[in-house]
Amino acid sequence: MACPLGRRTPLAILVVLLLAPGVASAQGFGLNKKTVKLARSLPPAIDLSGSRVGVNVTGIPGRPQMVAPLLRAKIVPLVFSNGTVMEAQANPDRLIEVTVTDFTTATRYDADRSQVVTATIRAAYRTVNNQTKQSLDARNLAFDYERRFPPPPTAPPPPKDPKSFAGKMNKIFGPPQAAPVPTENVPPNAEQLQTLMVEALATQVAQRVVLTKEVIDVPLPKGKLDEISNLAVAGRWGAMLEALEQTPPLPAADDAYRIYAIGVANEALAYLEQDPAKQRDLVANAAQNFKDALKLAPDESTLKKAEYRIAQSMAALSVAAAQQSQATAADGASGPRRGDAKTGGTRWDNAAVIELAKAGLKESELVDAIKSAPKPEFDVATPAGLLELHRAGVTEIVIKAMRMRMQGGPTP
């Protein structure tokens, strides 16, 4: 869950142990995952500071339309609680528009009587300049939920001999009862699941327009790596990284989990790091680790989520650096030119796009970053600039977005 923060909150990390019983015998995450929480601050995709903002939420007929009022009720406090923008439904400067396009839930029972609950919510989001009707930011948002709940415990059978001691106790106190089900093993009811899904989508909307703090559950590998994962639980990220790097590669696809754990350690160390350059290096290392892990286990959903998460962090670091540079310039502070060795490369130029592309950002994410880049300085008009981009593997769609940004038109 995310909550809005002040404007210049740095990326940070909070590590909390989530107790999970059980021991995994096979390599992977196990049914009962061992998890830590990472908390990071994410700057918004667009700057609405000082604006009067309205929020409109609708849905297509059916369940999407039914959850639209609840979604708006969840979005409003997330957007306006930090005081950087003002709510104004009548003639606002900026208008946040959200259309819920899908909301589905399902439950199935497996052979072992465990219950699997799944849900999906999707929406089209955009923020527009209400005077010019120009789109300032747009994205298709989605949240998927899937969790397996173990079967409820059964009551022990009554004693066969009613004259035995157990039989007499049964006659006095009643038949044996099943053990109580732990709260965390109780599936959500329809109302709870709906609230969970709507809150997750509201968080994604808020992250586009205001600075937010996101807390994410990060699974740790078990099996042969269980003891090393305990170092993460204790917050000993440096020791975890060293232990993993000294561990011989595991057989075949099992090594994906060792490499993934190295990425988690690098990511956690990055959020603790105060030096911006070192922080970017650690995030880039984590991005490469997650990419390498996915090559060995391309169907592992946890690795896919990690790759997407670290791409967000890389983009957040770049946006935060650019915003800080812009704020410093606005305050009239004297200092070296943006982009020289002392400022850590905060210019939105070809080199910045190439760095983000190499860090693993997807094409659509690069286009989004280019669209909101403050004072871009892209070189897409000279042979040298285009050659630099093509040699680095930047796609034509991204180059087109850079060109349109420099021309002042809407990006594709």
Image (tube, grey):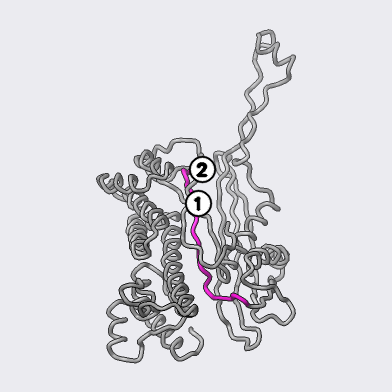
Mark 2 or mark 1, which has the lower sequence index?
Answer: 2
Q: Is residue 348 above or below residue 108?
A: below
Q: Which residues are magenta?
A: 32-50
- Quadrant of the frame with the N terminus: bottom right
Amino acid beneath label 1: Asp
Q: Residues within 10 Å of mark 2 (few under 14, many from 20)?
A: some
Q: Is residue 200 left or right of residue 31?
A: right
> SS class of the residue under badge 1?
strand
Q: Nearer the viewer, residue 385 or 186?
A: 385
Circle 2 SS class: strand
Residue drawn at (32%, 59%) of the image: 292
Q: Is residue 12 above or below residue 113?
A: below
Residue 353, image quadrant: bottom left
Q: Nearer the viewer, residue 14 or 10?
A: 10
Q: Is residue 295 visible?
A: no
Q: Residues within 10 Å of mark 1 (few under 14, many from 20)?
A: some
Marks 2/1 in contact by CB < 8 Å: the verdict is: yes
Q: Is residue 222 magenta?
A: no
Q: Residue at x 38, y 44 (%)?
A: 236
Residue 106 at x, y = what percent?
A: 62, 54
For mark 2, what is the residue? 18
- Residue 135 visible somewhere in the drawing: yes
Q: How many marks?
A: 2
Residue 35 is one of the magenta-drawn residues = yes
Residue at screen point 42% across, 38% down = 24
Q: Amino acid at mark 2?
A: Leu
Q: Which mark is residue 217?
A: 1
- Apparent side of residue 227 relative to residue 205 in the rendered image (left or right): left
Q: Position of residue 240 (x, y in %)?
A: 34, 45
Q: Position of residue 213 (x, y in %)?
A: 54, 60
